[in-house]
């Protein structure tokens, strides 16, 4: 029953507001302050599926990947106290990655504040500096307006995360049913696009045409904006090189002849670096030009001509003097640039395809030689190559930041533009992919979703194997088992005289652990057995895991120029 004839209680109003914004999935973990919200979810007919997770951080990671692949706002929830502190890392990661997720944390009653109730926490202060938008709702009648404001903030301008605190007594107080409405378009992103000034677009095209060897570097903003086809048209019209950051993968299909691939200190190689160094003009699109992309602001070098398109004005010229700045949505900016280029009648052939073909030939000849190696422990290149053969272009690969990230970023090839590869690049916390891959599945249920991780990451998220079994999802996990926090050990090797300290741990039986949860598992030590095991895992019904005894990262030929970026 509702709280009155034309009234809802606060918990019911929250459910109705999520429903009004088109929410179909919520990832979360129960707690005592959440009881009214769960009761409303139980009683009301709303069409929302709640996925119970084993950790609030993982609920946020699931919401993050869900948003990345679906184009919708991801929603996660958790209880007060520890639940709020646990969910925060996922909201921070999403906010820094321009991914719209809403974190709802329930809270102690407003009337109990200052009286030392169990799990009391100043949620407003905790979330304020780390999300795009944040509030703790103290008056139930304000709840619908606050939810609308959260969705408006998350999906307009530069997307980001939002937090709503929902005290226990507010969940039980009355809300007028007449206040339950939403701007339906704000459930998706980007909403209410804003384009750059027409004169700035004309200046950008003019500057670009004046160059002899320009190139584009795309960050995540191209895929977030859905500007892949506009980018392809623009690059093809000029036969111009397109490179990406790790987050920008999918801006152009990896197989496209104008796609150089990932550049920078993580996933870049000497051949791709040389292309950037030789460019006389670089156009950044939806890219912060941060330390990894630019190898600590050395590539491009200070003095190279720079153009920049971004929805966030604060990232433009933050690191490079910028000749022409376009502040606006990437899709609109590129569409306008294509129109200006077509109307000008100007034609250029900047020779991008030939330049890229030369660089890729050298890069992949070296990769394929190592991928064919029968050495044990198994080389990471062999794993990337094998998955590349077996997965189709619709597959979604979710990688943790450790061993998998540089190898997949550099060498995994997808023939389709769009978000097919996900990794958490803002803060790089371990344990992301095993949880996020569930969100990817719910956001794109028709695609095969694969999580790749190191064994350090495995230890962070082992509880979610119960979740994937409970839901019986057709997800495959791949573990690089090398019993080390490899990225840190590689840093100790390269920069600290091989003084290895507190980075090695005991090898776990990851296949055995996952099998105890009910997954079908394989353990592979011989490279000759890898393809058959992977194929069986990818084709099996339900969740599967392949435990690969892999070469330690500090001994591998990783595409990493600097371990401390």
Image: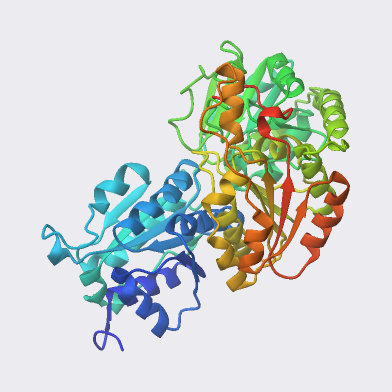
Q: How many marks?
A: 0
The x and y percentages for residue 17 are 38, 70
Residue nearest the observer in this picture, 132 or 64: 64
Q: Please say which color scheme the image uses.
A: rainbow
Residue extending furthest front? 506
The C terminus sits in image quarter: top right
The x and y percentages for residue 239 are 79, 29
Does 252 appear above or below 432?
Answer: above
- Residue drawn at x 34%, y 61% as measured from the top left: 105
Does 56 appear above or below 354?
Answer: below
Residue extending furthest left? 115
Residue 31 appears in view: yes
Residue nearest the observer in this picture, 359 or 197: 359
- The quadrant holding residue 304 is top right
- The quadrant holding residue 366 is top right
- Residue drawn at x 21%, y 75% as measured from the top left: 173
The x and y percentages for residue 456 are 57, 44
């Amino acid at each position: 029953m509702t709280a009155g004839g034309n009234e809802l209680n606060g918990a019911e109003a929250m459910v109705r507001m999520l429903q009004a914004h088109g929410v179909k999935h919520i990832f979360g973990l129960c707690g005592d302050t959440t009881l009214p919200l769960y009761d409303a979810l139980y009683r009301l007919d709303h069409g929302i599926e709640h996925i119970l997770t084993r950790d609030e951080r993982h609920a946020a990671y699931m919401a993050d990947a869900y948003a990345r692949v679906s184009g919708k706002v991801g929603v996660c929830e958790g209880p007060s106290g520890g639940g709020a502190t646990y969910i925060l890392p996922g909201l921070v990661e999403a906010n820094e990655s321009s991914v719209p997720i809403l974190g709802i944390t329930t809270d102690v009653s407003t009337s109990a504040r200052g009286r030392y109730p169990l799990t009391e926490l100043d949620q407003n202060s905790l979330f304020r500096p780390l999300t795009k938008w944040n509030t703790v709702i103290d008056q139930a009648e304000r709840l619908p307006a606050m939810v609308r404001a959260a969705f408006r903030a998350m999906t307009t301008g530069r997307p980001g995360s939002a937090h709503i605190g929902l005290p226990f007594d507010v969940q039980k107080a009355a809300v007028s049913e007449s206040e339950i409405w939403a701007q339906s378009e704000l459930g998706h992103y980007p909403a209410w696009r804003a384009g750059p000034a027409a004169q700035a677009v004309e200046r950008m095209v003019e500057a670009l045409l004046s160059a002899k060897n320009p190139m584009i570097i795309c960050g995540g903003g191209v895929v977030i904006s859905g500007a892949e086809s506009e980018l392809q048209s623009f690059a093809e019209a000029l036969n111009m090189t397109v490179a990406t950051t790790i987050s920008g993968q999918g801006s152009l299909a990896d197989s496209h002849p104008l796609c150089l691939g990932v550049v920078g200190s993580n996933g870049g190689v000497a051949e791709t670096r040389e292309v950037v160094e030789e460019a006389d003009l670089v156009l950044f699109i939806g890219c912060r030009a941060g330390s990894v992309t630019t190898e600590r602001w050395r590539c491009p070098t200070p003095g190279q001509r720079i153009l920049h398109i971004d929805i966030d004005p604060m990232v433009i010229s933050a690191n490079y003097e910028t000749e022409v700045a376009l502040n606006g949505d990437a899709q609109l900016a590129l569409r306008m640039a294509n129109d200006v280029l077509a109307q000008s009648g100007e034609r250029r052939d900047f020779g991008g395809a030939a330049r890229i073909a030369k660089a890729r030939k050298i890069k992949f000849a070296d990769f394929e030689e190592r991928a064919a190696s029968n050495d044990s422990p198994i080389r990471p290149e062999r794993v990337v190559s094998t998955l590349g053969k077996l997965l189709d272009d619709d597959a979604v690969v979710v990688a943790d930041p450790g061993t998998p990230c540089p190898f997949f970023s550099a060498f995994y090839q997808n023939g389709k533009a769009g978000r097919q590869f996900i990794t958490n690049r803002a803060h790089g916390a371990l344990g992301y992919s095993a949880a996020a891959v569930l969100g990817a599945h719910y956001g794109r249920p028709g695609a095969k979703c694969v999580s790749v991780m190191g064994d350090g990451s495995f230890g962070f998220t082992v509880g979610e194997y119960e979740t994937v079994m409970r839901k019986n999802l057709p997800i495959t996990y791949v573990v690089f088992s090398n019993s080390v926090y490899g990225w840190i050990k590689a840093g100790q090797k390269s920069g600290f005289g091989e003084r290895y300290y507190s980075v090695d741990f005991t090898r776990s039986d990851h296949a055995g652990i996952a099998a105890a949860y009910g997954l079908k598992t394989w353990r592979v030590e011989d490279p000759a057995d890898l393809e058959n095991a992977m194929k069986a895992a990818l084709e099996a019904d339900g969740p599967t895991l392949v435990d690969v005894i892999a070469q330690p990262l500090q001994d591998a030929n990783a595409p990493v120029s600097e371990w401390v970026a």
